[in-house]
Amino acid sequence: MAGHKRYKVMSNEPELKPTPGQPVIYQIRIKGHLGHRWTDWFEGLTISLEENGDTLLTGPVIDQAALHGLLKKVRDLGMPLVSVSPLEHGQADRSDVKL
């Protein structure tokens, strides 16, 4: 197409580029509170119960296949998925985590 230009949308968000072989820390937010019995099922993730009724699952995810596996577990719970967000290093401070 003559005269057609493509524009790239710029974002103020920093692009997260994982180091090969290093896990990315993800935060998965679901609607509703999970009980303590789910800690073993989400091995490696910290479960935080928020005052607004959401649950945050936070922790390292080695690759996209592992992320999809976690999302399948969330689906199997039957609880609504609110968001999935990669965190920058240092953004996930385990000292704030409540179980």
Image (cartoon, grey):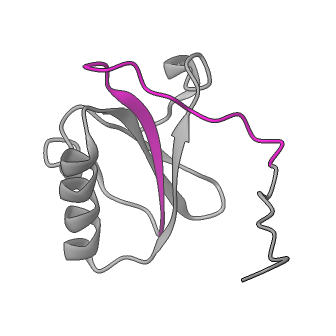
Q: x, y percentage for residue 19?
A: 39, 18
Q: Residue furthest left?
A: 40
Q: Quadrant of residue 79?
A: bottom left
Image location (x, y in percent) of residue 13: 75, 41
Going by the image, does 71 lie left or right of 66?
right
Q: Is residue 45 magenta?
A: no
Residue 4 drawn at (x, y percent): 80, 76
Q: Considering only vertical position in the picture, is 97 above or below 54?
A: above
Measuring from the top left, give residue 40's x and y in whole percent: 14, 42
Along the line of sight, the residue nearer the viewer: 28 or 61: 61
Q: Is residue 32 left or right of residue 60?
A: right
In the rendered view, would you say 25 is above or below 35? Answer: above
Stretch of the chain drawn in magenta:
11-31
30 horizontally vs 96: left or right: left
Residue at point 58% right, 26% down? 88
Q: Nearer the viewer, residue 93 or 22?
A: 22
Task: Examine the residues drawn in magenta and state their main secondary structure.
Answer: loop
Q: Quadrant of the C terminus?
A: top left
Q: Residue at x 31, y 20 (%)?
A: 20
Q: Residue at x 55, y 34 (%)?
A: 87
State the residue at coordinates (83%, 42%): 12
* Image quarter hosting the N terminus: bottom right
15 drawn magenta: yes
